[in-house]
Amino acid sequence: MDRSLYVAMSGAKETLLAQTSNNHNLANVSTNGFKADLSAFQSRAVQGPGYASRVYSTDATVGWDNTTGALAQTGQELDVAVQGDGWIAVQARNGGEAYTRAGNLHVDVNGLLQTATGHPVLGDNGPISVPPYSAINVGRDGTISIVPVGQQASTMAAITRIKLVNPPTSNLHRGDDGLFRTNNGAPAESDATVSLASGVLESSNVNVADAMVQMIELARRFDLQVKAMKNTDENAQVTAKLLGLS
Amino acid sequence: MNTALWAAKTGLDAQQTQMAVVANNLANVNTTGFKKGRAVFEDLMYQNLRQVGASTSQTTEAPSGLSLGTGVRVIATEKVYTQGSFNQTGNSLDVAIAGRGFLQVTMPDGSIGYTRDGSLQLNSQGQLVTASGYAIQPSITIPPGAQSISIGNDGTVSATLAGASSPTTVGTLQLADFVNPAGLQPHGENLLVASAASGTAQTGTPGLSGLGTLQQGSIESSNVNVVEEMVNMIETQRAYEMNTKAISTTDQMLQFVSQNL
């Protein structure tokens, strides 16, 4: 069989994978703090005898779009958005530290500050426990202050600070649960330069126009690969006809 | 079949839910004490198809792998407890809660429901009830022939009886508060019920221990912002369309294969 069939097949298969990644981005167009996946193709030449024409392609997730999503005003004190670069530290299911930019926080029944996905938010000294309050405020540096129940508004007391980090992007990867982690698993250092805005949420940073164009491009590229496969098939048919006994 | 189709399908599901939430918010734009809902999304787990950092030779490793996301899911539709605006009604049995807290009502099954709808009425026994006829807890009965009823900021209900020169206190309205009001379960009829996520109710006198005060003669209108909902609706519709497009494009790709090969 002509080897070009396999080259075209790998192109079609990997294009479909890239389309999956693009569809995932489109599906998450309303997910707060979502970072669009970026995929790229890499060429993989096959070494061996014959003319060096066999270069397969593989789809790779090369990272995520690190731009900030649009900030949407919500007016809720516990909705926070990281301004510029930086991440909010949360506790992952296995107890390790992970990072997110989805800042729709709430206080659970035990007084623990959590993200909407139920991950406890980390402060400078572990998970943040918020005593009963009548008013709460999150400062620009992540300081949480409350007016304890039954106290005057003048007795605003700072409890702790939300741990904000800003490790280099090259040291981060996205886990299977969608949270980000450092590559070596070690907790990142707090960064005092990261600032939070309260009362706003960061929307998904998926650029829909871009994703739509990407979708068309991938679909057409896929068609081309299939066309190439069909061509190979036709070549083979002609060969069989010419060589066939009449 | 292909994950590309399923990822786009989860997007449709999520936008459908978002639309339902927006529609419910808009439908309740004039519901007294209504708190708007908000759908919260989360990206679904990622499938690791090619491990990043896998060895490509003894000394080198792949700088990038392939992990494909599988779409989105709705994790919660939470209530947003911002204060609604006050409408002056002048009706002496209308109370609005300024600040935190809920009025407690006895539901037909005997359990307690919580509401911020303070458009109260009297039933045939003179008891303070909600618009659905459920009695307010603790129960307050206005004596027959009361000329005027006044409700203080701290919940004290007093009535001036015919022939009396000064009002008599007939009861006190109490408010209940929760650690996590967003965890209350909406029950319909403007009522919410306590859940494991909300915690147990802490009752108290209005104005004390962080609870709001009561305003007689006003009702709290819904906190739905119509413009915001309209923007949400546009966003939802476009996102839905784009996910539909993703499905049809993937479908066409697969169709092309089956027709050409």
Image (spheres, rainbow, N blue to C red):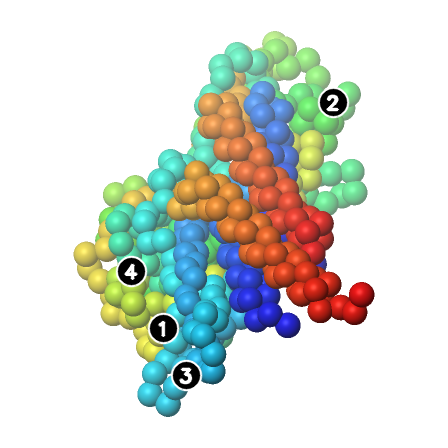
Report which residue position mark 4 lands on. A164
Q: CA distance from mark 1 to mark 3?
A: 10 Å
Residue neighbourhood size for the residue with mark 2, other residues' Cα within 10 Å, grouped as few (<14), some (14–19), many (≥20): some
Of the residues shown, which amino acid type is indicated by label 2?
Answer: Asn
Task: Point out the frontmost of discs 2 and 3.
Answer: 3
Task: Please report the residue visible at 57 percent of the width from the left and 50 percent of the height from the top.
Answer: A223
Residue B39: give x, y in percent of width and height.
Answer: 55, 42
Q: Secondary structure at mark 4?
A: strand
Label whose residue precedes the other's in the sequence (2 or 3): 3
Of the residues shown, which amino acid type is indicated by label 1?
Answer: Pro
Q: Is A222 located above or below residue A235 in the figure? A: above
Quarter assignment of residue B241: top right
Task: Please report the residue visible at 53 percent of the width from the left and 61 percent of the height from the top.
Answer: A11
Residue neighbourhood size for the residue with mark 3, other residues' Cα within 10 Å, grouped as few (<14), some (14–19), many (≥20): few
Asked whether residue A28 appears in the rendered view, the answer is no
CB under 8 Å between callouts 1 and 3? no
Of the residues shown, which amino acid type is indicated by label 3?
Answer: Ser
Label whose residue precedes the other's in the sequence (1 or 3): 3
Q: Secondary structure at mark 1?
A: loop
Q: CA distance from mark 4 to mark 3?
A: 33 Å
Task: Point out the frontmost of discs 1 and 2.
Answer: 1
Task: Point out the frontmost of discs 2 and 4.
Answer: 4
Q: CA distance from mark 1 to mark 4?
A: 27 Å
Report which residue position mark 1 lands on. B63
Residue B95: give x, y in percent of width and height.
Answer: 54, 24
Report which residue position mark 2 lands on. B123
Camera-nearest residue between A70 and B224: A70
Q: Chain of mark 1?
A: B
Report which residue position mark 3 lands on. B55
Of the residues shown, which amino acid type is indicated by label 4?
Answer: Leu
